[in-house]
Amino acid sequence: MQSDGHKQPRMNAAIVGVGTLFDTLTLAALPPEDEAIRPAIRQLIADAIADLPSDRRARSWAGFDAAFSRKLGEAGFLGLTLPKAYGGQERGPFARFVVVEELLSAGAPVAAHWIADRQSAPLILNFGTEEQRQFYIPRICRGEFFFCIGMSEPNSGSDLASVRTRAERTDAGWRVNGQKIWTTNAMYSDYMIALLRTSGSADDRHSGLSQLIIDLKAPGVTVRPIMDLAGDSHFAEVFFDNVDLPADALIGAEGDGWRQVTAELAFERSGPERIYSSIILLDAWIAHLRHVGRKDSATLDLVGNFTARLATLRAMSIACTARLAAGDSPVVEASLVKDLGTSFEQELPIAIGADLAAWPDEVVSDDLHRTLAYITHLAPSFSLRGGTREILRGILARGMGLR
Amino acid sequence: MNAAEFIEPFARLMDEVMTPAAVRAAERGGDISSLWQMVQESGYLDALVSEEAGGAGLDLGVVHGLWQILGRRAVPLPIGETMLARALLSMAGQDAPDGPIVLAVMTGNAPVIVPLGQIAQHVLVENAAGLTLYSAASGAPQGTGIYGDLSARFQWDAVSGNSFAKPEAGLRAYAALLRAAMIAGAADELVQRTADYAAQRVQFGKPIGRQQALQQNLAVMAEHAVAARLASQLGCAGGLPISPAAAATAKSVASHAAALVANTAHAVHGAIGISEEYDLQLLTRRLHEWRLADGSENYWNRILGAQRLASAAASVDFVRSALPCAAR
């Protein structure tokens, strides 16, 4: 619209694209052949978690169960996006969406294989040597090798480019010194893919960073679990004291670490795990409402609000998956869905707590009470892990041409 | 079907004829008959009428793209409403008259306010008898007294006419889904205009869009505009007949986005956005109107909430079955 005689700004071509903002994010459907996986994965999950109470299931991707992960591997539910030549299923991102949706919505303990399956194996496939692919990927697909990601350091959180942990060239390969922290599942993992400085100093920012695969059983590695506010130890600090690694510990090109990490984060941010973190609580609350038979208009309003947003976020997450399936790296789109998704995940425990305590004469089961407390306490982490809310909004602002 | 071959000509037509000057003229009570004639001749009013009945037989998913354009250009003609009315009339075997048709849900003989009612020639009314097409004049349309507002208050005392069965979800669900798509179109336009303004407007020696506080707000605005788009696309994905869950999801998310997007657009534009002369208000006034028309987010939340609580399914299973991302 142009007003007559009054100068109004025209659209910035970089923002507008073909006329719609972020128009690559558009409704997509799960292909029927991928939907068809659902009954089998559902059965496998039901057998494994039948006896788990809600507050254990609410831990889902903090729930470590190596035997369950191996079972998933045996049944062909890991490595769904990876080539058959490396032990994968060659099914693609939509099949992975179905399996991940089933695992998370049931609250299955997925921590053991989660990071390896989601991002380490695709990273090794994209940037690794043939030898690295042959060695690591089939074992990840079988649920035998578990990975963690070494990004944060004591003085490097959101400002990831400031990492100081160094890998120096030696005659035999690399020597690592320094420290990582807040590393999810480091104490259970076989390997860490770490972002390290291989040249220059922290002032060199994005250049001079590389990714190395560190065998966590190597001499000089110390892993110290950190207890979280719910009494669990899901993350750890990891110390490297003259840790010698072979030359083939380097993944991808030396100095390319930043570019590789950016691609990796698109995998980390684009999955349905960014909308389902509080889903066990939502289901437990709805079961409670049905049990006590509460149907007043405020209750219906809240239930409908959550349901509409859940349906929309799911559609957005599938739309993002469609970008992955098309071979894109949907960095901006994934940030958009993750920020909206984590806001939803964080609002649930606050609103459900307010609702339950607004009816103090209703009996709330111990299980629901514990689930509410657990999700309430952990919810702040939802918008920290995988990139903070403020960082993601900065990425969006860049996508809008503002920076 | 290639959606773009239907959507792009429509976008060009609207860009050409729905200039801000034309929108303002219509809002001030100007004659819209030549505009309407152009739209009528374009054939788009029968977008949802089946091919056998002489229409284009487009999927609702494609029509969503047309509805978004109506929102993006703040079109002051009931084109989307007329598309729906003509499709419903055609399915009932009734001939549709020429001229603009709006949609209204009546309870008893209580008066009802209908967007664009002042320029409608007919109203498709849902009441206890089902759906009936009335002449607009028979409902004694009265303006609301709101500046630039073409909605009208209608009232029918004795109702009679050639009634036919209403769709199962009710006419309000159809109108709500249309509103949701128009909100998505207007919201997208506002995000782009606001981002562009922020990149050009200089204060404190640099574009205000360089301020992190504004960037964060603009990012949230964009998120909600995209959510409105996906929610309304999802609502259209199931096609006709429209389900209550489809309309509820689309309208709940879009109505919530409408207020937030309008607020941020104004906050970033500052005082000029409040002026009549500047085009921003053409879009933000409509966002607020469409947010409330045919049920606000709270209305549709209650509908969807009741359906959800009636089901023993887990939330994800409920959503998968009630709101599929593809045609049922």
Image: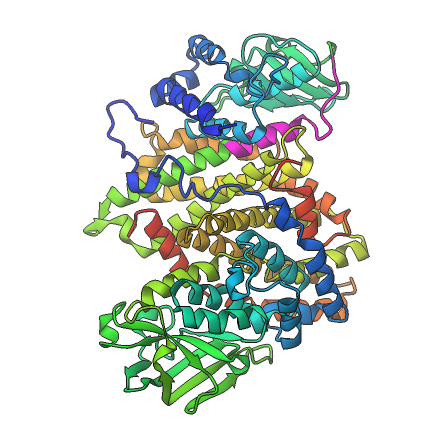
Examine the rendered structure and indicate whether residue A164 appears above or below residue A109. below
Q: How is the image coloured?
A: rainbow
Residue B245 belongs to magenta span:
no
Question: Residue shown at 41%/12% (left/top)?
Answer: B30
Q: Is residue A6 visible?
A: yes
Examine the rendered structure and indicate whether residue A287 appears above or below residue B245. below
Quarter of the image with the C terminus of chain B is top right
Examine the rendered structure and indicate whether residue A186 appears above or below residue B302. below
Q: Is residue A385 visible?
A: no
Question: Residue shown at 44%/42% (left/top)?
Answer: B261
Image location of residue B237, percent across then percent down: 59, 36
Q: Is residue A18 left or right of residue B230?
A: left
Frontmost residue, B184 versus B292: B184
Image location of residue B59, percent across then percent down: 58, 27
Frontmost residue, B77 versus A138: A138
Question: Residue shown at 48%/36% (left/top)?
Answer: B184
Image location of residue B209, percent across then percent down: 29, 49
Magenta span of residues: B163-181
Examine the rendered structure and indicate whether residue A263 appears above or below residue A330. below
